[in-house]
Amino acid sequence: QDKSGTLLFDGTNQYGTVANVNIPTGTSDFTWLFWLRIPTTFASPGGLNANDGYAMILSSTQSYFYLAIFKNNTNYTVAYDNNSNLNRFGNVTIGTWAHVGVVRSSQSSTGYLNAVAGTAMADTTSLSGSLELGRYGVNQTQRFYFNGPISIGHIYNRALSAAEVFQNYQATRWRFGI
Protein backbone atom coordinates (compact mmCIF):
# COMPACT_ATOMS: atom_id res chain seq x y z
CA GLN A 1 0.00 0.00 0.00
CA ASP A 2 1.27 3.49 -0.80
CA LYS A 3 0.55 6.66 1.24
CA SER A 4 -2.64 7.42 -0.73
CA GLY A 5 -4.34 4.16 0.30
CA THR A 6 -3.72 2.54 -3.08
CA LEU A 7 -2.79 -1.15 -3.04
CA LEU A 8 0.22 -1.96 -5.22
CA PHE A 9 0.31 -5.46 -6.73
CA ASP A 10 3.44 -6.85 -8.42
CA GLY A 11 1.75 -9.47 -10.62
CA THR A 12 3.58 -12.41 -9.07
CA ASN A 13 2.06 -13.43 -5.74
CA GLN A 14 0.33 -10.53 -3.98
CA TYR A 15 -3.41 -10.45 -3.28
CA GLY A 16 -5.95 -9.56 -0.62
CA THR A 17 -8.93 -11.50 0.72
CA VAL A 18 -12.34 -10.06 1.53
CA ALA A 19 -14.13 -12.56 3.77
CA ASN A 20 -17.45 -12.71 5.57
CA VAL A 21 -18.29 -9.01 5.56
CA ASN A 22 -21.68 -8.84 3.85
CA ILE A 23 -20.20 -10.40 0.73
CA PRO A 24 -22.87 -11.15 -1.86
CA THR A 25 -23.53 -14.89 -2.16
CA GLY A 26 -25.68 -17.18 -4.24
CA THR A 27 -27.38 -15.50 -7.18
CA SER A 28 -28.06 -12.27 -5.28
CA ASP A 29 -27.50 -8.82 -6.79
CA PHE A 30 -24.14 -7.12 -6.27
CA THR A 31 -21.82 -4.39 -7.51
CA TRP A 32 -18.02 -4.41 -7.70
CA LEU A 33 -16.29 -1.09 -8.55
CA PHE A 34 -12.56 -0.28 -8.57
CA TRP A 35 -10.05 2.25 -9.82
CA LEU A 36 -6.95 0.66 -11.38
CA ARG A 37 -4.01 1.50 -13.58
CA ILE A 38 -2.13 -0.78 -15.96
CA PRO A 39 1.61 -0.11 -15.60
CA THR A 40 3.88 0.21 -18.60
CA THR A 41 5.01 -3.37 -18.03
CA PHE A 42 2.10 -5.78 -17.97
CA ALA A 43 3.23 -9.06 -16.45
CA SER A 44 0.95 -12.07 -16.52
CA PRO A 45 2.06 -15.61 -15.71
CA GLY A 46 -0.71 -17.23 -17.75
CA GLY A 47 -3.27 -16.61 -20.42
CA LEU A 48 -5.86 -17.86 -22.82
CA ASN A 49 -3.51 -18.49 -25.73
CA ALA A 50 -0.06 -17.49 -26.93
CA ASN A 51 -1.04 -13.85 -27.52
CA ASP A 52 -3.22 -13.40 -24.45
CA GLY A 53 -2.44 -12.77 -20.85
CA TYR A 54 -4.71 -11.80 -18.02
CA ALA A 55 -4.56 -10.53 -14.50
CA MET A 56 -7.25 -10.52 -11.87
CA ILE A 57 -8.96 -7.59 -10.25
CA LEU A 58 -11.46 -9.48 -8.11
CA SER A 59 -12.67 -13.08 -8.06
CA SER A 60 -14.93 -15.36 -6.06
CA THR A 61 -12.85 -18.15 -4.50
CA GLN A 62 -15.40 -20.97 -4.77
CA SER A 63 -17.31 -19.86 -7.86
CA TYR A 64 -16.39 -19.21 -11.45
CA PHE A 65 -16.89 -15.44 -11.53
CA TYR A 66 -14.16 -12.86 -11.93
CA LEU A 67 -13.34 -9.36 -13.15
CA ALA A 68 -10.06 -9.11 -15.06
CA ILE A 69 -7.77 -7.32 -17.49
CA PHE A 70 -6.95 -9.29 -20.64
CA LYS A 71 -3.96 -8.54 -22.87
CA ASN A 72 -4.30 -9.44 -26.51
CA ASN A 73 -1.25 -8.32 -28.45
CA THR A 74 -1.31 -4.53 -27.82
CA ASN A 75 -4.88 -4.20 -26.47
CA TYR A 76 -5.76 -4.29 -22.77
CA THR A 77 -9.42 -5.15 -22.29
CA VAL A 78 -11.56 -5.15 -19.16
CA ALA A 79 -13.85 -8.18 -18.90
CA TYR A 80 -15.76 -10.35 -16.52
CA ASP A 81 -16.48 -14.05 -16.73
CA ASN A 82 -19.49 -15.74 -15.17
CA ASN A 83 -19.23 -19.49 -15.43
CA SER A 84 -17.29 -19.57 -18.73
CA ASN A 85 -19.26 -16.77 -20.44
CA LEU A 86 -16.64 -14.10 -21.09
CA ASN A 87 -17.91 -10.54 -21.61
CA ARG A 88 -15.23 -8.06 -22.74
CA PHE A 89 -16.56 -4.52 -22.38
CA GLY A 90 -13.85 -1.93 -22.93
CA ASN A 91 -10.18 -1.19 -23.59
CA VAL A 92 -7.92 0.49 -21.05
CA THR A 93 -4.84 2.56 -21.80
CA ILE A 94 -1.46 1.71 -20.29
CA GLY A 95 -0.41 4.21 -17.64
CA THR A 96 -3.91 5.73 -17.28
CA TRP A 97 -6.29 5.21 -14.38
CA ALA A 98 -9.63 3.56 -15.17
CA HIS A 99 -12.81 3.01 -13.18
CA VAL A 100 -13.96 -0.58 -13.76
CA GLY A 101 -16.69 -2.75 -12.37
CA VAL A 102 -19.56 -5.13 -12.80
CA VAL A 103 -23.18 -4.90 -11.63
CA ARG A 104 -25.44 -7.94 -11.32
CA SER A 105 -29.17 -7.21 -11.18
CA SER A 106 -31.96 -9.76 -11.51
CA GLN A 107 -29.62 -12.43 -12.92
CA SER A 108 -28.12 -10.12 -15.56
CA SER A 109 -24.59 -8.70 -15.31
CA THR A 110 -23.22 -5.54 -16.93
CA GLY A 111 -19.59 -4.42 -17.04
CA TYR A 112 -18.65 -0.75 -16.64
CA LEU A 113 -15.57 1.13 -17.79
CA ASN A 114 -15.35 4.78 -16.70
CA ALA A 115 -19.10 4.71 -15.91
CA VAL A 116 -20.01 3.55 -19.43
CA ALA A 117 -22.04 0.34 -19.46
CA GLY A 118 -21.14 -2.58 -21.68
CA THR A 119 -23.57 -5.18 -22.99
CA ALA A 120 -25.62 -6.99 -20.34
CA MET A 121 -25.32 -10.77 -20.14
CA ALA A 122 -27.50 -13.38 -18.43
CA ASP A 123 -25.89 -14.49 -15.16
CA THR A 124 -27.02 -17.25 -12.81
CA THR A 125 -23.59 -17.95 -11.32
CA SER A 126 -23.89 -18.78 -7.64
CA LEU A 127 -21.20 -16.90 -5.67
CA SER A 128 -19.68 -18.60 -2.65
CA GLY A 129 -16.55 -18.38 -0.56
CA SER A 130 -14.53 -15.24 -0.02
CA LEU A 131 -13.49 -12.67 -2.62
CA GLU A 132 -9.85 -12.25 -3.59
CA LEU A 133 -8.52 -8.90 -4.74
CA GLY A 134 -5.67 -9.23 -7.22
CA ARG A 135 -5.77 -13.01 -7.76
CA TYR A 136 -7.76 -15.78 -9.40
CA GLY A 137 -6.78 -19.42 -9.15
CA VAL A 138 -8.47 -22.66 -9.99
CA ASN A 139 -5.79 -24.65 -8.17
CA GLN A 140 -2.35 -24.27 -6.58
CA THR A 141 -0.48 -24.37 -9.92
CA GLN A 142 -2.77 -22.21 -12.05
CA ARG A 143 -3.11 -18.77 -10.48
CA PHE A 144 -3.25 -15.36 -12.11
CA TYR A 145 -2.33 -12.09 -10.37
CA PHE A 146 -2.89 -8.41 -11.03
CA ASN A 147 0.11 -6.20 -11.81
CA GLY A 148 -0.38 -2.55 -10.88
CA PRO A 149 -2.22 -0.32 -8.41
CA ILE A 150 -5.86 -0.76 -7.35
CA SER A 151 -7.56 2.00 -5.41
CA ILE A 152 -10.95 2.93 -3.97
CA GLY A 153 -12.65 -0.44 -4.21
CA HIS A 154 -16.34 -0.80 -3.48
CA ILE A 155 -18.23 -4.06 -3.00
CA TYR A 156 -21.98 -3.65 -2.61
CA ASN A 157 -24.46 -6.39 -1.77
CA ARG A 158 -27.00 -4.76 -4.09
CA ALA A 159 -27.14 -3.69 -7.72
CA LEU A 160 -26.29 -0.04 -8.23
CA SER A 161 -28.16 1.80 -10.95
CA ALA A 162 -26.26 3.27 -13.90
CA ALA A 163 -26.74 6.70 -12.29
CA GLU A 164 -25.16 5.45 -9.04
CA VAL A 165 -22.18 3.95 -10.91
CA PHE A 166 -21.74 7.30 -12.65
CA GLN A 167 -21.97 9.11 -9.30
CA ASN A 168 -19.21 6.87 -7.86
CA TYR A 169 -17.06 7.62 -10.90
CA GLN A 170 -17.66 11.38 -10.79
CA ALA A 171 -17.04 11.63 -7.03
CA THR A 172 -13.49 10.24 -7.23
CA ARG A 173 -12.18 10.82 -10.75
CA TRP A 174 -10.34 14.00 -9.74
CA ARG A 175 -7.95 11.85 -7.63
CA PHE A 176 -6.75 10.15 -10.81
CA GLY A 177 -6.45 13.15 -13.10
CA ILE A 178 -9.57 12.35 -15.11
Image (cartoon, rainbow, N blue to C red):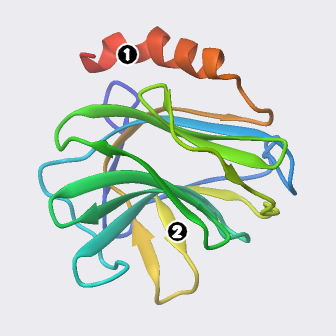
Give residue 1's position: percent from left, percent from top: 37, 40
Quarter occupied by residue 172:
top left
* Amino acid type indicated by mark 2: Tyr
The disc at residue 11 is none
Mark sitting earlier along the chain (1/2): 2
Give residue 8's position: percent from left, percent from top: 33, 46
Judged left or right of residue 96, residue 34 is right
Secondary element at image label 1: helix
* Amino acid type indicated by mark 1: Arg
Give residue 137's position: percent from left, percent from top: 54, 76
Q: Residues within 10 Å of mark 1 (few under 14, many from 20)?
A: some
Judged left or right of residue 39, residue 115 is right
Q: Residues within 10 Å of mark 2 (few under 14, many from 20)?
A: many
User: What residue is shown at x 15% (from left), y 59% (from top)?
Assistant: 74
For the image, the number of numbered tags is: 2
Secondary element at image label 2: strand
User: In the rendered structure, are the residues bearing label 1 and label 2 in contact, judged by CB atoms less than 8 Å apart?
Assistant: no
Judged left or right of residue 49, residue 93 is left
Residue 32, compared with residue 85, is above or below; it is: above
User: What residue is shown at x 63% (from left), y 45% (from top)?
Assistant: 120
> Which residue is more in the foreground, 29 or 24?
29
Alpha carbon of mark 1 to alpha carbon of mark 2: how far? 27 Å
User: What residue is shown at x 67% (from left), y 67% (from top)?
Assistant: 61
Position of the C terminus, as image quadrant, is top left
Give residue 54's position: percent from left, percent from top: 36, 66
Quarter occupied by residue 127:
bottom right
Q: Circle 2 is placed at which residue position? A: 136
Residue 4, compared with residue 96, is above or below; it is: above
Q: Circle 1 is placed at which residue position? A: 173
Residue 52, compared with residue 154, is above or below; it is: below
